[in-house]
Amino acid sequence: MEKIALITDSTSDLSNSTIERYNIKVLHYRIIYKDKEFIDKVTITPEYVYDNLDKEIPTSSMPSMSEMEDLFTNLEKENYTHAIVVTLSAGLTGFYNGVKLVSENHPKIKTYIFDSKSISLGEGFIVTNCAKLIEKGVSFDEIVRTIPIVRSKIDLFFVVGTLEYLKKGGRIGKVAGTIGELLNIKPIVSIDNNDGKYYTYDKVRGRKKSLSRLVEIANGILDKKKCKLCIVHGHALEDSKKIFDSIKNHKNVTSAIFGGALSPVGGVHSGPGLVGLVLFEEE
């Protein structure tokens, strides 16, 4: 009899109710200031990050090896036979490799680690889909075969207030920064399906046009297929609600979720002003 554990990290931005309902195991990033360290979504809020960016831009680190080790040890004690791990894009973090190393120390648990090549609720959609399949009693091997198909149905785009924080955090990827900032060029950013790094999907001049372009992109996708819609934000509540209201009534939106704020560690790297769009294609 298979007993499958489902594991992700705190950047997947799942609600507490979803985590509790499906018994999802969450490993937490660390946010590090000069004189203190916080656990993402446990001992720090997004508001704390944004309120203190003018004083200090913290660094971050992936979930600790000891936290991962403790989790797998507990899974063995609880007689789990299998584990599925969905990670933040490996193009942005070392977490994928870290959890792979730890899982190899626990051969009693057959573990599959999937690089989401996504962030926030793009990653979260994959986790939730896995959770529903586990709840239905679908086999480990069948779920593993399904996950890449689920990933292929996700479209994710975002705009930021400034590229400063992506640059400082080393997460700029293939998004050109300095000259664009001077000309007030606002890139529409997505994630490359091959290397999992950020790239410029499109670019316009000015904040207002960037938000309008986000709506255009969403409508262009929705004109062709039915999708779940989700909007998230990083210290941009008003703008994100406007975008949500502009898209949610499209005839091909099957359900609309206002996901709220990014995880604190997401805020560290994106800075204030992020509006994120996630679409999940439905059959």
Image: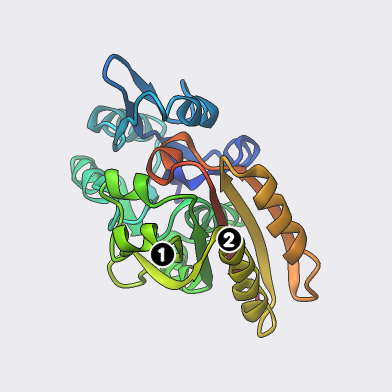
The amino acid on which the numbered mark 2 sits, given as a three-letter code, is Leu
Label 2 Cα neighbours within 10 Å, binned few <14 / some 14-19 / many ≥20: many
Q: Which of the 4 image quarters holds residue 64?
A: top left
Name the spot of residue 280 as percent of width and height, x first.
59, 67
Name the residue located 48 percent from the left edge and 53 percent from the top edge.
160
Cα distance in 3D space between marks 1 and 2: 26 Å
For the residue marked with disc 1, what is the amino acid?
Val
Q: Secondary structure at mark 2?
A: strand
Q: How is the image coloured?
A: rainbow
Question: Could you say which is closer to the camera, residue 177 or residue 129?
Answer: 177
Q: Residue at x 47, y 69 (%)?
A: 146
Mark 1 residue crowding within 10 angstroms, few (<14) / some (14–19) / many (20+):
some
Residue 79 horizontal/vertical position (percent): 40, 36
The quadrant of the rendering that contains the C terminus is: bottom right
Q: Position of residue 35 (x, y in %)?
A: 28, 14
Q: Which residue is mark 2?
A: 277
Name the disc covering residue 144, or none. Answer: 1
Mark yes or no: residue 77 visible.
yes
- Which element is circle 1 on? helix
Q: Is residue 174 above or below residue 119?
A: below
153 relative to 60 in the view: left or right: right
Which is more foreground, mark 1 or mark 2?
2
Seen at 50% across and 58% down, the residue is: 159
Q: Residue at x 61, y 57 (%)?
A: 136
Q: Earlier in the sequence, mark 1 or mark 2?
A: 1
Is residue 282 found left or right of 28 in the rendered image?
right
Q: Nearer the viewer, residue 174 or 65?
A: 174
Q: Nearer the viewer, residue 189 or 94?
A: 189
Residue 276 on image: x %, y % = 55, 56
